[in-house]
Image (spheres, grey):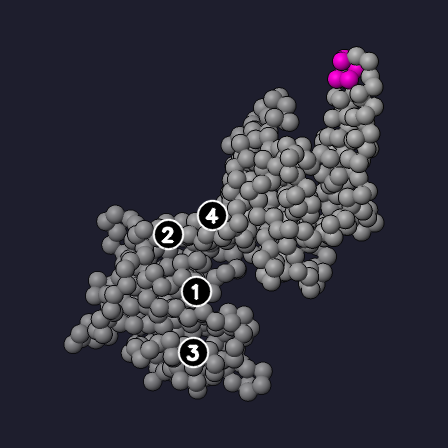
Amino acid sequence: MSESNVPQMMAELSKLGSTEDALAALELLEKNRREQYFIKYWAPITEGQKEVLRGFVPGIKTFVVTGGNRSGKTEIGSAIAVAWALGKDFFRGEPAWEWVESLPIPDPPNNIWVVGLDFPTIRDVIWHEKLRFGKDHPPFFPKDPKILEARDGDFRALFKNNSILTCKSADSGREKFQGASVDLVWIDEEPDVDIYDECFQRTVDCGGKLFVTLTPLTDIGSGTRVPWVFGLHEQMRAGQKDIAFGKLSVLDNPKVPPEEKERLRQKWAGHHEEGARLFGEFIQRQGLVYSLWNPAKHIVAPFRIPNEWRKIVSIDPASTGVTAAVWGAVSPEGDLYLYREYYERNLVISEHAKNILVRNAGDIIDFWLLDPKFGAQKNAETHRTNLSLYRDAGIPARLADVEEDFGVNASLEYVNATVTAGSRWPKLFVFPGMKNFIWEIGRYTWDQFHKGPQKGLTKERPRKRDDHLMNAFQYLCAIRPRPRRLGGPQRGEDKISAAQRNSYT
């Protein structure tokens, strides 16, 4: 029954003889209408869902909803996506108007993408259970051919107001996400960052929005190659105003029976995934390398570095990708101050060297350090070492004399001494302008075994990801630089071998 038949039904009701019959018929009419237009009657059933809908305001570009299994995050994503396709006017005077009214839904037609991790998820959960046919509730799509045409073959819905909703699988690759202008992208669970980046790009020209729902099991130490959702969370905490987060708990969902909630509590109690599974909280399944890093203590107000302090530049180069460098200064007490950084990608050595010298701004540098593995490699075209190419470009670099762990333990001693009362080891302090360094050190984790009997256990080396400035920092710490002693012998090169020292003179 479509809404156009309502007047006819009302006329039929007026002919019924008793009030009881009329009420029964009205109840049946309302039940049928709820089945046919469930989206008009859907309403948030938990306080978390209400908070999410209240928080998705016009100034928000990306809204992320974290929630445990069965917390209702996919349901709220379905409601948002279909509401965007139908437009606000479709809901005026309806029960759902209460939550639709404040949403930043543009006038139709709108282009909506629904992104799932893989094809089975799109087909079985999002399309069949939520949008098209329903399972534990009627479908979010109206059952009215005068409103939309649902194409089950390609998981696409064409609305009569010319809106289009298309389901897309993240595992189809980034190329499948190019070209269109999209008003809303709903991403269910966390794909690789290249999918998110492409979706974000599709919304730029039309001021579109991104709505993300996930169980936050992909943290800073595992899962996708780049944990971009955790990155968004950190950007929000740092004050970025166009990113918002909402959180749902499975224990608040009235559709989950009490006995099942109790089973969930017992299953996950004390487990490292308890916070994510039950409450939608971010977890960290692998330990931070610099677990004592504390911005409140390590980051200090910038000041002019005295000329008499020893200054060192440490470079972590790359043939492709990011080349990074840190500027360090050693105080008379032996403390290490990192005061400047370089972070650029996809340039040749001569261009990096030129940029680093410009960034140096005329500072008198006592010595320059270079990654020993990269520096010893020979260039394929010139058959000269990369170290020689840096020297030819004006940087008198020497290979860093790293320890077996490439300076990880030495750098840990600097970091930990800053927050350890009474420590006699030199301390580390960082200027706030070291934004990339600060970003990396807060996400730098130990690697773990990904298969076999040791799966999930931590290895004894850091994970190779977002570590460019960390490497440069470790090369610097490995030489354990000493302060300059005015009028006396220079002691900053204690950890550089005699053979190396002679080769540089």
Rendered view: 181 above or below 256: below
Which of label 2 and label 4 is nearer to you? 2
Rendered view: 230 above or below 352: above
Residue 262 visible to the viewer: yes
Depth order, front residue of 186/351: 186
Instruction: Tell me where the magenta segment starts and ends, as one range.
Output: 19-23
Residue type at mark 2?
Trp
In the image, 287: left or right of 331? right
| Among numbered discs 3 and 4, the one appearing first in the sequence | 4
SS class, disc 4: loop
| Among numbered discs 1 and 2, the one appearing first in the sequence | 2
Depth order, front residue of 5/418: 5
Rendered view: 229 above or below 93: below
Rendered view: 419 above or below 144: below
Where residue 9 sits, quadrant-wise, is top right
* Dot label at residue 293: 2
Q: Which residue does the numbered mark 4 point to in the structure image? A: 287
